[in-house]
Amino acid sequence: MGRGARPARRRLSVDRRREELVAAALELFGERDTEDVSIDDVASAAGTSRALVYHYFGGKQELYVAALRSAADQLEARLRPSEIGDPVDRLGVGLRRYFDFVEERAAGFAALVRGGPANRSGEVGEIVDGVRHRLLGLVMRLLRAEEAGPVLRVTLRSWIASVETAALDWLERRDVDRRVVERMLVDQMVATLGVAARHDPRIVPLLENLVSEHAP
């Protein structure tokens, strides 16, 4: 390359360019509130022009939705149900995969969780609630529960909120060993089901199924 020549712009496929922009946006949305991130910020982080960002996305809201959907897809891909071990072990495996995503895709997780509940309306709310619904379904399958009555629904949704909060706290502070946090959440599930069973006898066999096969 001659002296003073400008480096050639990398030629990327449409999909690869979109992925780059989404990845840059996720980093920014994970670090700042949505309103504090501009298209110029995303363009700068991706090493491209604001015109190119607008070429691929109609505006910041469309980019924000695409970024959250990408994070949600990545997380859900990790949440494959395990068939190995007893129910408590499988719950632990699920939490380990969840925290793998939290650790490896910190900005994406932060952006996804902070996308609700304040922004629960529209596509953003659908994306965030979709992940939580997927988690609810996985736990129900683990418990062999055919349907969630009111007490069980409140219990499981509260536990999922606890998982999100614990993951964010661990991500921000990291002053507790990650494996300890995961074990605490497993123990919390058993404890909260025990409380719920006192209010709804239909939960008793679900709790017994969860703990009966587990070696102390």
Image (cartoon, rainbow, N blue to C red):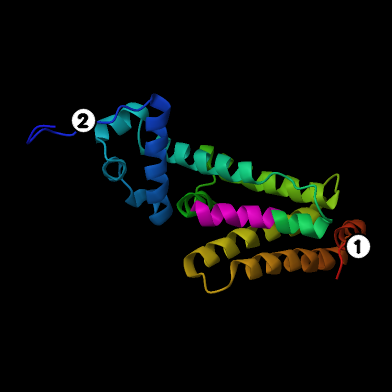
The label on residue 212 is: 1
Q: Which residue appears at 84% of the width and 56% of the height?
A: 86
| Depicted 129 relative to depicted 16: above or below | below
Give the image location of residue 120, x and y in percent: 54, 46
Magenta residues (range): 94-105
Residue density around tag 1, few if under 14, some if 14–19, many if 20 or more, within 10 Å: some
Tag 2, which secondary structure?
A: loop
Image quarter in which the N terminus is found: top left
Q: Secondary structure at mark 1?
A: loop
Rendered position, 187 above or below 127: below
Residues at marks 1 and 2, CA–CA distance in whole angstroms = 64 Å
Q: Main secondary structure of the magenta part?
A: helix
Q: Tell me if 210 is positioned left or right of 15 in this view.
A: right
Q: Residue furthest bottom?
A: 175
> Residue 21: percent from the left, percent from the top?
37, 37
In the image, residue 100 lies in the stretch drawn in magenta: yes
Amino acid type of the residue that numbered disc 1 sits on in the rendered structure: Ser
Instruction: State which tag comes first along the sequence, 1 or 2.
Output: 2
Is label 1 or label 2 in front?
A: 2
Label 2 sits on residue: 8
Considering the image in quadrants, where does the C terminus appear?
bottom right
Q: Position of residue 55 (x, y in %)?
A: 32, 27
Numbered tag placed on residue 162 in the rendering = none
Answer with left or right where residue 139 lies relative to residue 105: right
Q: Quadrant of residue 47?
A: top left
Q: How many numbered badges does the structure rendering display?
A: 2
At 80% from the left edge and 60% from the top edge, which residue is drawn?
88
Disc 2: CA contacts within 10 A as few (<14), some (14-19) or many (>=20): few
> From where the camera sits, is residue 131 visible?
yes
Q: Nearer the viewer, residue 170 or 84?
A: 84
Q: Quick check: is 9 in the magenta stretch?
A: no
Q: Does 207 sit left or right of 129 as displayed?
A: right
